[in-house]
Amino acid sequence: MLGAWGRRIVPTVLVPLVSVLCGFLVGAIAILAAGADPIQAYSALFAGAFTNHNAFAETLVSTTPYLGLGLAVALGFRAGLFNIGAEGQFYIGSLTGTFVAYSIHGLPAVIEVPLGLLAGMVGGALWASIAGGLKARFGAHEVITTIMLNYVAFLVASYLVDTPGLMLAPGVSTPRTPNIDTGALLPIIVAGSRLHLGFIVALLAVPVVWFLIERTTIGFRLRAVGFNQGAARAAGISVGWTIVLTMAISGALAGFAGIVEVLGVNYHMTDTVAAGYGFDAIAVALLARSNPWGILPAALLFGALHNGASFMQLETQVSSDLISIVQAAVIIFVAAPVIVGWLFRLRRAPGATVQITQRDIEAPVT
Amino acid sequence: MSDFLHQLDPVSLLSITLVTATPLALAAMGGMMSERSGVVNIALEGIMLTAAFIGYGVAFFTHNLWLGVLAAVVSGMLIASLHAVLSISFLVDQIVSGVVINILAVGITGVFYRTYLESATTAGPGTLPHWNVPVLSSIPVLGPIFFQNQFVTYAMLVLLFVVHFVLFRTVWGLRTRACGEHPRAAETAGINVYFVRYVNVITSGALAGLGGAYFSLQQIGNFLPNMTGGRGFIALAAMIFGKWTPFGAFGASLLFSGSDQLGSRFQSVFHVPIPIQFLGMIPYVLTIIVVAGAMGRAVAPAAVGKPYKKG
């Protein structure tokens, strides 16, 4: 009925699209239950995300971290790895990048900025490699280790930022690191807004990750391990090494997202942890069906939701947490396309189950 | 000086350790019921948060703390049912389903707290009463620690024995473990794998829901956004560190909450610069060490995390 083109387009475009609509529908029910008008609330959300003064630029600012984080989780998925630790890698990347960025002075910006970014990526990569190494060497499940490493990362960050003589700026009332020199910051690209060069850099990461996964030897190995570990091993691929490398690249992307937030938006790090990035990153990657190109619209949606939510709360008294309900509903519909198929009487919902990973909890993989 | 002694009084330290271990042990037992039947439950955090909220809301509007506790347990079961439907019937990846519930919990509690509770001016329902067990509560040392508590803590202590008995001494427990180790073989032996998993996941919601009631109805008598503060994940760590057994998980919960208490007391009494963050890392680091197999390997049920398809 649908043809070859249709079979391709339905799972990759139609299911996510319908899922997003269904997600907003569920959100509308929640708004009604909270005694507000969904049309008003969503209008405010839309205005806050796109049409208010500078709103679109702000949406792109919020989209930026989701690009890096979404790519990080999606890359892991392709190798059959569930990286719940994007949030921890985000913080460690912020820490190492911030440390380098405020420590260097007097170099040209073309050297200082990349140095900061690189330091953030290295920090995230090393942190994620812990989970990768434990999985490759001992078969420790990455879901458990990355959840635990997230909390260790928050505590490490809080320790370093709160302790005099370490990363605490002298003489500040609320704990934070010293400010970073202007020369090491990501410059603003739209005058009068907060939109910074990091957005462009994060956009460029999309084709880079696509190329890495689809057109390089590393990417081939990574996909082979995700598809069938036994076959990959039989074909001579070192499964353990591929797992460590995949986690490292994934962590580098999450660390990149972290340091870009610092160099582009905050200019220093505080010890407060804005939890939730890790789960949102999983949501972005699922919505994109682990396809790097799909990260673009998915990250934009999440950026827009986050940016519009505060204006919605201001205008309509509906809590900005509403967007969490929308996000959760969207993932339910994306992850269980059976429901969408059933709702729309698509007889055989293509790709009826999302087989993200072929996880085998106990098998050591060396 | 008297404050100094009070702060380091081992009886008060142990008693507060037991109390703060309550939600950890309950949620860890919940996770255990679910995982023993083969369904990973990383949604414990979201279940506890939602239950803490609904329980408080019901107690607030009915002025009845016990209806609140009941509502917390029932709402935990409802949220867990969502996990069950998604991961068992719709074959959604169990981690994804858990992530969904954790996000959803933030949304539901945030939106409805703001609408119905945030600006409420009437007095709250208070906290669950302290019950002193006759005779036993006057035993030195043991009395103040075990027998002068509130309802959720007593319930946790009783449930330790119940869950242990059910898992290891009943037919149901045997079936549960069979579904978690080898669902295909269990099905061949005539066990309805879906049914066993559904019941266990929903039971897990009841246990975690009771754990949620601890926060809003036993500890402070109020609801605050995100008041569970990651304790669902510490419970997950306690379950793993306790090797998927109730008493193991209980011991781990005591260890984790005890180190936390000790850390904050050391800071306030001695002003010792033991960075509180390092004590806070203990549960997570120990769990990582255990899953890596360096300290007596923690072995998960063999089929945990794998959706089971009949046929």
Image (cartoon, coloured by chain):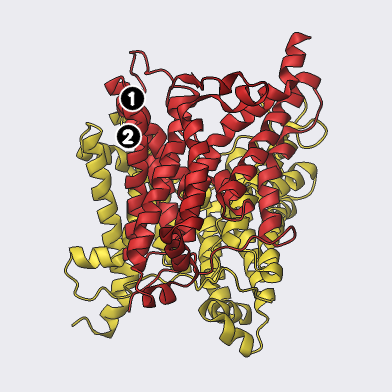
Chain colours: A yellow, B red
The 10 Å Cα crowd at callout 1, few under 14, some 14 to 19, many 20 or more, is many
Distance from label 1 to label 2 (Cα)? 8 Å
Q: Residue A251, position in %: x, y? A: 63, 59
Q: Residue A136, position in %: x, y? A: 68, 70
Question: What residue is shown at x 38% (from left), y 75% (from top)?
Answer: B189
User: Does residue B256 appear left or right of residue A31 in this picture?
Assistant: right
| Residue A207 numbered tag | none
Mark 1 sits on what residue?
A: B59
Q: Residue B70, position in %: x, y? A: 33, 34
Question: What residue is shown at x 69% (from left), y 57% (from top)?
Answer: B290
Question: Considering the numbered disc 1 on the image, is that residue within a helix, a strand or a loop?
Answer: helix
Question: What residue is shown at x 61% (from left), y 63% (from top)?
Answer: B299
Quarter placement of the N terminus of chain A: bottom left
> Can I make out residue B192 in this image?
yes
User: Does residue B248 appear left or right of residue A328 in this picture?
Assistant: right
Is A14 drawn above or below residue A89 in the view shown? below
Please tell me which of labels 1 and 2 falls first in the chain: 1
For the residue pair B205 and A235, the one nearer the viewer reads as B205
The 10 Å Cα crowd at callout 2, few under 14, some 14 to 19, many 20 or more, is many
Amino acid beneath label 1: Ala
For the residue pair A152 and A309, the one nearer the viewer reads as A152
Is A190 drawn above or below residue A217 in the view shown? above
Q: Quadrant of residue B273?
A: top right
Amino acid beneath label 2: Ala
Mark 2 sits on what residue?
A: B71
